[in-house]
């Protein structure tokens, strides 16, 4: 056995699989011609970023529309940064947006496991192969030695890092490495880079076209001292043995592409096709800047879920920023399912991913405005069950009452578009329910100061004696004017202005008194509808409570 094989066996005594064995165990997928195998590879380090949902949606659609496969792999090798539970949360959030994978680390699949910490045997077998080929070696440098090296490099004004002449462990003879490992010296495994720092590598990006990038000349750590692989190396092994064909990810990964390409070449594996999406930007006081995890709540998809944006609208918006021809297609196909549109890499732009919350809002408003009372009630209840159980139980206490409230100014020629998201509904209608109404009664009511309490009492008592709700809206309003007149109020603002002395106020002032009494506020949706939904008994009870507080 040559010394390299001996070294490889010493480092990986339990690894018996060869690359050929793995090729057989994870064979190329049998899929139709042109099918894409795409993936999303989150690290369990926090919330699902809006940019990641965007990339995942694109990956999912590309796979679905080509009869391919979209899978999610959890990249959890950086145990220090891991936040427990976030992997599952990401899957749940993806599913909520309809971006559910065909294979993932919960449901499994033919290329399982889909979680990097469980794939160590594959990484080990691959590194073993590289050691045998002289393309990977153990590095015994201590932190102090690496620090000293960095200082020397700074003093010499050369590129920092483990490269060329500075990659000292590169030159350790296999027999010496064997001796040091036997003596118990700790080590990491590095990849021996064939690159130089003025070398260039030509890569193709599906959005950016052909690019000439600087070659990687660093001997990167591929296996840490804890035996786990680093991201770059794990991704090579996983995407090869999971038979990924297309990687769509954020442009922050573009600088790593030369490393990835080099690793694929070292293994003699075909390169994947890569598309690096532009970072999602937003306009902030007229200037474009990156959507920031720290500053912008909309950077996390949980923001849209908690606020209750209609999922459909949000996906529609993401489709418009994914492909420049989507909006034109939508105009030509106003009622088609958005996923009938075929996404392509050549209609993605490098400056198109401007995240415009105003536009999301206006799409959402249209969607909520076009829903029937039944649809919006059901959707609002589903949202409330997840995020506002208090609202959900109020709705469930009388579903038809809620549906009646939601029917106000809905349908017809010009439906009102008050709501952008489900969370907007409650502040507008909560006075229809006891807790919010009782709370309003506790605070000073917004009476018109120019009208005396005695007049207010008279108006309320008069109206409560007969709210005449069996009349249709127009007749009801006619009658209201008569009652107003009997209490000393002008039937219109115009008449009042002509002769202010003759009246206590006008019909608007009169109606406002009743509105405040039954709702606790000056503004409500359509007054007549509110009254008919509250019904005579509730109106009388609320007016009596208001009078008691005058
Ligand atoms: N795990 C990497 C991340 O957290 C994935 C990068 C890739 O898609 O290749 O973003």
Image: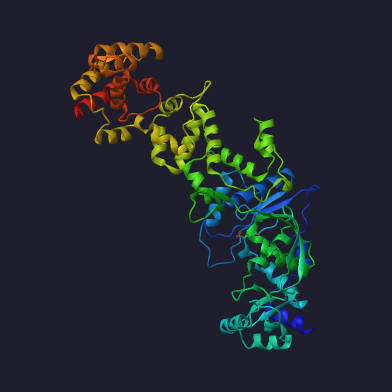
- How has the structure been colored for display? rainbow
Residue at the image point whose x is 71% and y is 60% from the top:
239
449 to the left or right of 37:
left
**Figure quadrant of residue 451:** top left
The image quadrant where one finds the N terminus is bottom right
Location of residue 264 with respect to 87 vertically, above or below: below
Q: Is residue 171 visible?
A: yes
Q: Quadrant of the C terminus?
A: top left
Q: Judge from the rendering whether residue 184 lies leftward or rightward of residue 434; answer left or right.
A: right
Please tell me which residue is depicted at 34% across the width and 20% down the height of the picture. 535
Vertical placement of 361 versus 117: above or below? above
Q: Is residue 43 above or below residue 448?
A: below
Q: Position of residue 31 (x, y in %)?
A: 78, 49
User: Which residue is rendered at x = 30% and y = 30% of the image?
Assistant: 520
In the rendered structure, the answer to whether residue 462 lies left or right of residue 364 reads left
Q: Nearer the viewer, residue 379 or 232?
A: 232
Percent across and percent down for residue 142 are 59, 83
Residue farthest to the left, as pictured:
454
Query: Residue 83: horizontal and vertical position, in percent?
Result: 51, 61
Q: Quadrant of ligand 1?
A: bottom right
Q: Residue furthest toward the right?
A: 33
Residue 472 visible to the viewer: no
Residue located 65% across and 55% down the image: 249
């Amino acid at each position: 056995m040559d010394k390299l094989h001996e070294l490889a066996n010493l480092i990986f005594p339990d690894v018996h699989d060869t690359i050929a064995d793995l090729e057989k165990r994870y064979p190329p997928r049998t899929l139709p011609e042109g099918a894409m195998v795409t993936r999303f590879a989150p690290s369990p380090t926090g919330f699902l970023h809006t940019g990641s949902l965007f990339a995942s949606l694109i990956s999912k659609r590309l796979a679905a529309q080509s009869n391919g496969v979209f899978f999610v792999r959890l990249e959890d090798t950086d145990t220090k940064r891991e936040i427990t539970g976030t992997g599952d949360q990401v899957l749940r959030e993806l599913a909520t947006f309809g971006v559910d994978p065909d294979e993932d680390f919960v449901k499994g699949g033919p290329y399982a496991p889909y979680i990097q910490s469980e794939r160590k045997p594959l990484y080990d077998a691959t590194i073993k192969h590289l050691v045998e080929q002289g393309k990977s070696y153990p590095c015994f440098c201590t932190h102090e030695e690496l620090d000293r090296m960095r200082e020397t490099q700074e003093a010499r004004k050369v590129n920092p890092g483990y490269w060329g002449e500075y990659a000292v462990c590169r030159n350790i003879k296999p027999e010496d490495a064997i001796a040091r490992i036997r003596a118990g010296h700790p080590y990491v495994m590095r990849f021996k880079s064939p690159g130089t720092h003025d070398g260039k590598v030509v890569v193709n990006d599906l959005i950016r076209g052909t690019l000439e990038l600087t070659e990687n000349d660093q001997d990167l750590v591929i296996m840490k001292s804890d035996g786990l692989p680093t991201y770059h190396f794990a991704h090579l092994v996983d995407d090869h043995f999971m038979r990924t064909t297309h990687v769509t990810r954020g442009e922050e990964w573009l600088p790593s592409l030369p490393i990835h390409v080099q690793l694929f070449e070292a293994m003699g594996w075909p390169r994947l096709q890569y598309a690096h999406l532009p970072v999602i930007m937003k306009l902030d006081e007229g200037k474009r800047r990156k959507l920031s995890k720290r500053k912008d709540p909309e950077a996390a998809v949980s923001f849209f879920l908690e606020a209750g944006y209609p999922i459909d609208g949000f996906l529609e918006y993401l489709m418009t920023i994914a492909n420049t021809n989507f909006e034109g297609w939508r105009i030509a196909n106003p009622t088609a399912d958005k996923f009938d549109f075929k996404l392509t890499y050549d209609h993605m732009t490098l400056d198109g991913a401007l995240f415009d919350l105003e536009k999301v809002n206006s799409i959402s408003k249209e969607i909520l405005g076009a829903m029937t009372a039944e649809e919006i009630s059901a959707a609002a209840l589903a949202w409330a069950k997840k995020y506002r159980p208090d609202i959900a139980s109020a709705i469930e206490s009388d579903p038809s009452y809620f549906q009646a409230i939601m029917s106000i100014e809905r349908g017809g020629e010009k439906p009102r578009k008050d709501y952008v998201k489900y969370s907007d509904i409650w502040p507008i209608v909560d006075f229809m329910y006891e807790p919010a109404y009782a709370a309003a009664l506790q605070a000073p009511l917004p009476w018109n100061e120019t009208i005396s309490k005695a007049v207010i009492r008279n108006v309320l008592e008069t109206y409560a004696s007969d709210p005449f709700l069996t009349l249709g809206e127009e007749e009801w309003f006619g009658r209201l004017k008569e009652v107003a007149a009997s209490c000393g109020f002008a039937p219109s603002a115009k008449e009042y202005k002509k002769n202010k002395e003759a009246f206590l106020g006008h019909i608007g002032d009169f109606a406002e008194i009743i509105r405040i009494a039954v709702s606790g506020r000056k503004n409500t949706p359509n007054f007549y509808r509110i009254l008919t939904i509250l019904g005579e008994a509730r109106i009388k009870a609320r007016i009596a409570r208001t009078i008691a507080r005058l």
